[in-house]
Every structure is written in C-alpha cells, then in structure tokens.
Image: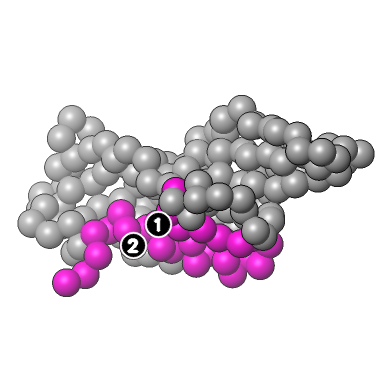
Amino acid sequence: MADHRAEIILEAVRTTLESDGTFTVLRTPVDALSGELQEVPAACIFMGEELPRGDTGYEVMGSYSATLAVYIDVWDVADREINIETKLLDLRKKVHIALMQSSRLGLSFVFNLSPFGADEPELSADGSALSGKLRTNWLMEYRSSVEDPSA
C-alpha cells in the first residue's frame, strides 16, 4: 500500500534538502532529540497540523484539499567569535532556496508551497562553543482522493 500523501511530501522535503548537500538531514524528532547532534549543520523535518482547505476540504468533487504544516529545524554550532544567529539565518536561506527551486517538490498533487515565517532561535553555550536551533515553518497545499489519502 502506498504512503499517505503527507508522508510523501515529508519524504520529498527530506530528499530535496539532502540533494542540496549542506545538511545532515534527520526525518524524525527522535533523531534530533536522542542526544547530541553528531554532524552539523543539520536539518530536522517535522510534520505539523493538517487543515482542510475551505470549510471542509472538498472543493473539487472526488478530492480532498488540505494545507499541511511542515517544520524544519536547522541546527549549527559556532565559536564565540562567530555569530550563531548569522549561521542559522544562512541555513534558513539555504532551506528556502532549496524548497522554492524544487517546483512544488516535484509532486503533481502539491499545488502550492510557501514559507510561513520562523520561530525565535534557541541558543545555548557550552564552553567556548555556541549552539543554536532555528525552526522554519512551511505550508504545503495538496490534493488527495477522498477515498484513499495515498491516491
């Protein structure tokens, strides 16, 4: 059985970011939260909420339209002399460029993807190094069959 379209979108985001070559890409929160990140810069992809488009999501007969929130956390470390926020913003820019150049992630059922801001950076110090995480927020609009969310 095929994957839910939301899973296909998340996998396409992962593949797109990996092909950029900038990041170690983690697909699940468990990967990011299971201890120290061994390789940075890194990007971790999280599924957010999914909401129907319009009142019910049934704008087109026989199909369901939804907006899926996708969160991408970028992580990096820096010496105290280097501004960690600058590094995080550069990684945010690279995520943005990679996703926007991917033409709807190459998926025919995705009809729009758009950046939706970022959260406040989380910074911490450990000796002479600074580490930081910045969550970027994305909205992915897609269609699936009413009967089968993988079709």
**Vertical placement of 148 versus 46: above or below?**
below
Give the residue drawn at x 38%, y 46%. Answer: 47
Write down the residue under mark 1.
Answer: 10
Residue 75's spot in the image, x, y percent?
Answer: 64, 47
The amino acid pointed to by label 1 is: Leu
- Label 1 secondary element: helix
On the rendered image, what quadrant is the N terminus found in? bottom left
Does residue 26 show up magenta in the picture?
Answer: yes
- Whether residue 76 is visible to the viewer of this picture, yes or no, is yes
- Is residue 100 visible from the viewing direction of this image? no
Residue extent of the magenta highlight: 1-29
User: Mark 2 sits on what residue?
Assistant: 8
> Relative to residue 80, is residue 34 depicted above or below?
below
Classify 10 Å Cα crowding around label 2: few (below 14), some (14-19), many (20 and above): some
Q: Local crowd at mark 1 within 10 Å, few (<14), some, or many (≥20)?
A: many
Q: Are marks 1 and 2 in contact (CB under 8 Å)?
A: yes
